[in-house]
Image (tube, rainbow, N blue to C red):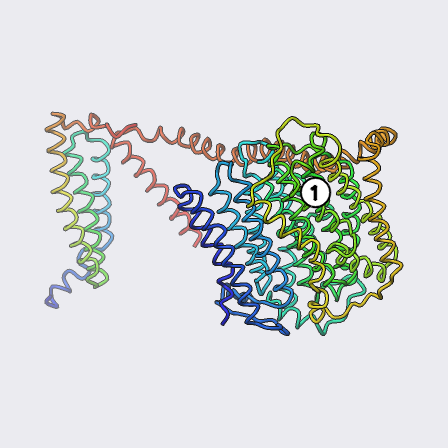
Amino acid sequence: MPAELTRILPQSVPLSWYLILSAILFSLGVAGFLFRRNIITVFMSIELMLNAVNLTFVAFSYHLKQVDGHIFSFFVMVVAAAEAAVGLAIILTVFKNRSTLEIDEVNSMKL
Amino acid sequence: MHHLWLIPAFPLAGFLINGIAGRRMPKTAVNIAAVGSVLLSFLWVLKVLAGLGSLEDAYIERYFTWIQSGFVNVSFDFAVDRLTAVMLMIVTGIGLIIHIYATGYMSHEGGYYRFFSFMNLFMFFMLTLVLGANYLVLFVGWEGVGLCSYLLIGFYFLKKSAGDAGKKAFIVNRIGDFGFSLAMFLIMVTFGSLDFGQVFAKAQPMAVEHQAGTVTLICILLMVGAAGKSAQLPLYVWLPDAMEGPTPVSALIHAATMVTAGVYMVARSAPLFNHAPIALDVVAVAGLLTAVMSATIGLTQYDIKKVFAYSTVSQLGYMFLGLGVGAYSAGIFHVMTHAFFKALLFLGAGSVIHALSGEQDLRMMGGLRKKIPVTFITLVCAAVAIAGVPPFSGFMSKDAILLSAHHHHPWMYWVGVITAGMTAFYVFRAIFMCFFGAYRGSAHPHESPVSMTGPLAILALLSLGGGYFNVPQYLEPMFGGQHAPHETTLVLISVMAGAAGILLAFLFYVIKPGLADGLSRAFGPVYRLVYDKYRVDELYDATVVHPIRDGSRLLLWRGFDVGVIDGVVNGAGSVARLIGGGLRHMQSGYIRRYAAWVVVGAIVLLAAAAGMGGQR
């Protein structure tokens, strides 16, 4: 990074901003998970929470000048991809069997 | 190597053959396996003893280390010394004779092969017992013969009384064995070994305990074991009941061999007992009391086997008297002569019972001397031997014991003499009631086959002449000389007591048969008390059996088992159900509800962490 640019943006964005953004994203995810009733939306809320966590990881990684956070976020991405594949497959099957994406209709785990 | 292990191995092989294949084998084959194995064992004993010569020292064969744990080191060894040699001859010799007899006696019985496989198993354990070179191997045999005793007493297992008698014998013996086990633990702790040679070598330099000490405790515990196995006060009650078994079993196990195991064990432990005079006195007094008490019971019984059973208890008491006054060799001598004449008495009684098709009540016999002459003559031989008529075997051994008793404490001699008189009386009472007068029963008596009369004849010869095997002299080097001065007066007195007993029996049961009944009526309450065996069984029932049974039922079963154990198990179950019943409301089945619980949990955790952080 050129020295001039460093002077203009000495602190760039402070760490706390990233964390606040991440917290907001995470809370949105939680709220979506809790209050939306479409399974697809719930599923996307989970992705949102995962990405909020990723953002935290990357922010800390940048702040601490360590690569660990990057590596963690890659792991999270891999897991998220796998989860997306499995989760979408489950959702497809549920829809085939129940003809609904209403999450409260899928309650046969109850005793 | 003289291959001592072959001696018990032959009967074990017989047991396995008859036990596994006996059911499908013809009777002749069962006989060959059963009697042949004991015969081989007997011959091997003869060969080994001939090969070992005079046996100045013990001959030991070490086979393998059995238990090695910390300071406990027990190996599986067999040893032969003079004491073992005498016992080996008794066990295999008498065992062989009784096996031959049993082939005749049991010929009409069901479970023929089972009977002989148990008999062979008994021989195996009994030989292990006398051959063992340490207390633990002895104990293996000791428990094994107890097992066989149980199996054979309960041989007629369809009869409830036989099963009960077997259980009684087993359980009463457990009490004795508990004492024996404690004694072994103490020996292990005190001497660091169970090997006879090592224990006695370490005991040798110790001081004689005139005050009670460890060795005294060990010896008294050993005596508790011996009292169980050899039917001494207060544990003798199982032996009379053991007569439920077939008669050859009574002869072999409950007269000639197994019940003398206690005598053998005490004699074997003589180096320990010599250091504990108090324990020796306990042995002598227990023996003497048992001898008197059971002799008086024997006076009144009508079951021919019961008479001889109480006689056995009484004679075992004599043996312990001999041991207790330090005359170990005399005690073992009496073991041998007793094996001869008591085996003969039982086998003769078996022959009578066989002749009368199962009748055992003396009141239903009488006048049999013409009908079964061989049985009669041989039984008389046994009777004169046990009554102490000189010069027959019982006289020799009983006199050796009585003289030593007099040397120790004169009053013991006098009690012993009175017992000898009673012995002569009850044995001849049985003889006279059985063979004289008029026949009172209804069966058709017939003489027994040669397989039974042959053994009777051999045992009769041994009973008459067995006293000339000079066992005391043979054993003297082992036990040291305990020379009681030979006092002719004392011998005469004991002979007179025996003669008086015989004459009284003759008077009561031959000349004036009504006299005995009149006398028993005159002493009504006393007579009934003795006839009821002093109600010892009832006493034990009231003081031991019932409290244990009721305690088990009320306290252990209803109280502890149902209350505590079941309570804990059921309580755990119902608590889990209670908690589950509460928690199941959380499991609504709605995924978003679960997610809400996760969020609540996360918030609680965060709040807790924040609280902790605040403190820090």
Is residue B65 positioned above or below B145 on the image? below
Q: Between B231 and B474, which is closer to the camera in this rendering?
A: B474
Where is residue B24, by image quadrant? top left
- Left or right: residue B123 versus residue A71 is right
Residue B311, percent from left and from top = 73, 45
Furthest toward the right, the residue is B489
At horizontal 80% and vertical 68% (from top left) the residue drawn is B483
In the image, residue B43 above or below residue B377: below
Tally of numbered tags: 1
Q: In this view, does B492 lie to the left or right of A94?
A: right
Side of B183 where A73 appears, left or right: left
Q: Which of A35 and B131 is in front in this view?
A: B131
Q: Which quadrant of the figure contains the C terminus of chain B?
A: bottom left
Please name the residue shown 10% across and 28% down the image. Answer: A96
For label 1, the residue is B308
Query: Is residue B225 shown to the viewer in this render?
Result: no
- The x, y position of residue B339, in whole percent, is 66, 53
Picture coordinates of residue B165, whole percent (x, y): 61, 38
Other residues around mark 1 within 10 Å, as few (<14) / some (14–19) / many (≥20): many
* Residue B171 can be seen, yes or no: yes
* Amino acid at pointer 1: Phe
Which image quarter: residue B507? top right
Q: Find the residue positioned furthest to the front.
A: B370
Expressed as whole percent of the image width and height from the top left, the position of residue B286 reads 77, 51
Residue B597 or residue A51, whichever sits in front:
B597
- SS class, disc 1: helix
Pointer 1 chain: B
Report which quarter residue B84 is drawn in. bottom right
Query: Quick one: B264 or B68, which is closer to the camera?
Result: B264
